[in-house]
């Protein structure tokens, strides 16, 4: 079921989300299916549970199919991640690149992120997931996990001269993906 996506200004996007303590429940699987439906309908690169008003540490991102809008985009495998913890790689750079957010529609900015991270969490069955992500993949993971701690990307902008409306920033160009 497709849910409404909360927009910036809603206090529910600013909460520290709760840890998931029960895995493999019917309610959890329903929530995940709804998040996949909602992200797919919005053609997003990722979605966090707080964005549909659910106060839990759950993010989904990536796709096993090529997005027809962005056939050349770097591939991020479909991942469902519970209670994630991110650790930047000690050798990681920090790079600024474009980000958008389904909770901040119509806008984009350049946001600094680590280019190489390790992340750990659980799958819906309670199995440990440990992975390494780089570049765009790492950016998506950091963006989605920020939602679990009440952080929206505008809070991380350094150079506000890059913050603007899509149709102005990318006039006549292909737009970057929404996170
Ligand atoms: Ni977002």
Image: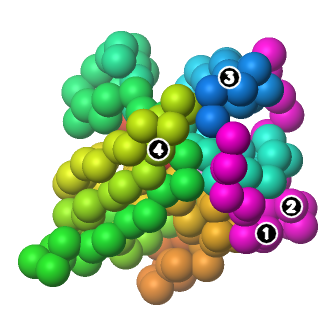
Q: Is residue 56 above or below residue 22?
A: below
Measuring 73% from the left and 62% from the top, which residue is drawn there?
A: 17
The numbered dot on residue 15 is 1
For image coordinates 46% across by 85% down, the residue present is 158
Instruction: Please tell me whether residue 4 belongs to the stretch shown in magenta.
Output: yes
Regarding residue 3, the answer to whether it shows in the image is: yes
Residue 119 percent coordinates (x, y): 34, 57
For the residues bearing labels 3 and 1, Cβ distance under 8 angstroms: no
Q: Which mark is residue 12?
A: 2
| Rendered position, 38 above or below 96 | above
Q: Quadrant of residue 78?
A: top left
Residue lying farthest bottom? 158
Badge 2 marks a residue whose secondary structure is helix
* Discs 1, 2 touching: Cβ within 8 Å: yes
Residue 122: assigned label: 4
Mark 2 or 3, which is nearer the eye? 3
Badge 1, how many Cα within 10 Å: few under 14, some, many 20+? some
Q: Quadrant of residue 85?
A: bottom left
**For mark 2, does the 10 Å Cα neighbourhood hold few (<14), some (14 to 19), or many (20 or more) residues?**
some
Report x, y in % for residue 121: 44, 51
Q: Which residue is mark 3?
A: 29
Question: Rounded to the nearest whole Å, what is the CA distance between mark 1 and mark 4?
Answer: 21 Å
Q: Main secondary structure of the magenta part?
A: loop
> The magenta stretch spans which residues?
1-22
Vertical order, 2 against 151 (above or below): above
Name the mark nearer the viewer: 3 or 1: 3
Q: Which mark is in front, 2 or 4?
A: 4
The earlier-in-sequence mark between 3 and 1 is 1
């Amino acid at each position: 079921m497709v849910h409404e996506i909360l927009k910036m200004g809603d206090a529910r996007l600013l909460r520290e989300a709760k840890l998931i303590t029960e895995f493999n429940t019917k309610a959890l699987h329903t929530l995940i299916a709804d998040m996949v439906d909602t992200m797919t309908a919005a053609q997003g690169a990722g979605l966090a549970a707080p964005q549909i008003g659910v106060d839990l540490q759950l993010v989904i991102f990536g796709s096993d199919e090529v997005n027809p809008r962005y056939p050349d985009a770097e591939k991020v495998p479909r991942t469902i991640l519970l209670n994630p913890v991110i650790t930047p790689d000690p050798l990681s750079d920090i790079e600024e690149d474009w980000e958008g957010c389904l909770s901040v529609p119509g806008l984009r900015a350049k946001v600094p992120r680590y280019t190489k991270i390790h992340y750990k969490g659980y799958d819906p069955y309670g199995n440990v997931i440990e992975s390494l992500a780089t570049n765009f993949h790492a950016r998506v993971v950091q963006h989605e996990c920020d939602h679990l701690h009440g952080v929206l990307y505008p809070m991380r902008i350094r150079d506000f001269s890059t913050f603007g409306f899509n149709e102005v920033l990318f006039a006549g160009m292909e737009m970057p993906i929404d996170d």
